[in-house]
Image: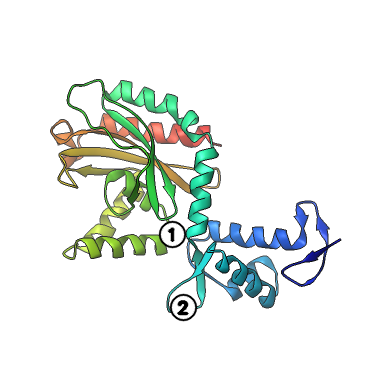
Amino acid sequence: MSTDPIRGEAARETPGGTESADRVADVLLLFARSEDPLGVSRIARDLALSKAVVHRILQSLSSRSLVQPVPGGSSYVLGPAAAGLAARAWSQLDVRSVASPVLRKLRDATRETTTLSVLVGDQRIYLDQFESPQEIKMVVEIGPRFPLHSGASSRAILAHLPQPLIDEAVRQLVALKPDTDVEAYLADLAISRERGYAVSLNERNTGAASIAAPFFDVAGNVLGSVSSSGPVFRYADLADGADERQTRLVVEAANDITDRLR
């Protein structure tokens, strides 16, 4: 029998480890599943724990930046250290190998560059790409982090995230572009969520266009997105929603990766 750092008393062993470790893990998993910030009362109720125990767990997690308090409120969200764990998990998870044949097949079918993006905290990174065989093509840089507010690959992910993360992405976008029509932006995000893909046409003034669709884990949490991208002149039909074949291929590729990860 060991000492429980949360309760300051002898900890009971459980099939998963010690009782205190189980509680901490349960709290973190609750944050991972929640679409909203969580407070002490909500966590205590959902996990059948006392508020005192929940408070001590949150204090411990907060001191390690695994969770952080919401400014001006009494609730918490996942912190930057949790994002770091997510990044490390992606580096160890074999999602690139799982997605590789799907990306290659999509590249061959579209003859455009195909990419794999994954969610890391409140940003995304390109994890892999298969370049177009055409002379004029788009090529992405693997590794750097990108915000979730702009670009089809980002917005395909953002459309399926909890509202607090959407609100933060909108705040970042408005800070970058003060004339942003927030109502129109959120309406477009809702359309992307409903139809299952996002598009961008020269969104960053780089001459690039892209179609992206999200993929999910077994619990239905969005993990990242798949895209087909190229020079904007080859995606002219996207403006009228006419390129049904290519959007269908991208959505099918994302669904295929979701199935392979289950």
| Element type where label 2 sits in the image | loop
Q: In the figure, is residue 59 to the left or right of 98?
A: right
Q: Measure how far apart labels 2 and 1 are at the Cα level.
A: 18 Å
Q: In the figure, is residue 200 to the left or right of 157?
A: left
Amino acid type indicated by mark 1: Pro
Quarter location, residue 163? bottom left
Residue sitting at x 72%, y 69%: 6
10 Å crowding of disc 1: few (<14), some (14-19), many (20+)? some
| Element type where label 1 sits in the image | loop
How is the structure coloured here? rainbow
- Give residue 140's mark: none
Identify which residue, 66 or 112, lies in the foreground: 66
Q: In the figure, is residue 37 to the left or right of 179?
A: right
Residue that badge 1 annotates: 162
- Give residue 73's mark: 2
Residue sitting at x 62%, y 62%: 27
Counting from the top left corner in percent of width and height, residue 32 is at 54, 56
Identify the mark nearer the N-term, 2 or 1: 2
Residue sitting at x 46%, y 78%: 73
Identify which residue, 126 or 108, lies in the foreground: 126
Choose mark 2 or mark 1, whichever is in front: 2
Residue sitting at x 80%, y 51%: 15
Residue 159 makes an appearance in the image? no
Q: Quadrant of the C terminus?
A: top right
Identify which residue, 108 or 193, lies in the foreground: 108
Counting from the top left corner in percent of width and height, residue 59 is at 60, 72
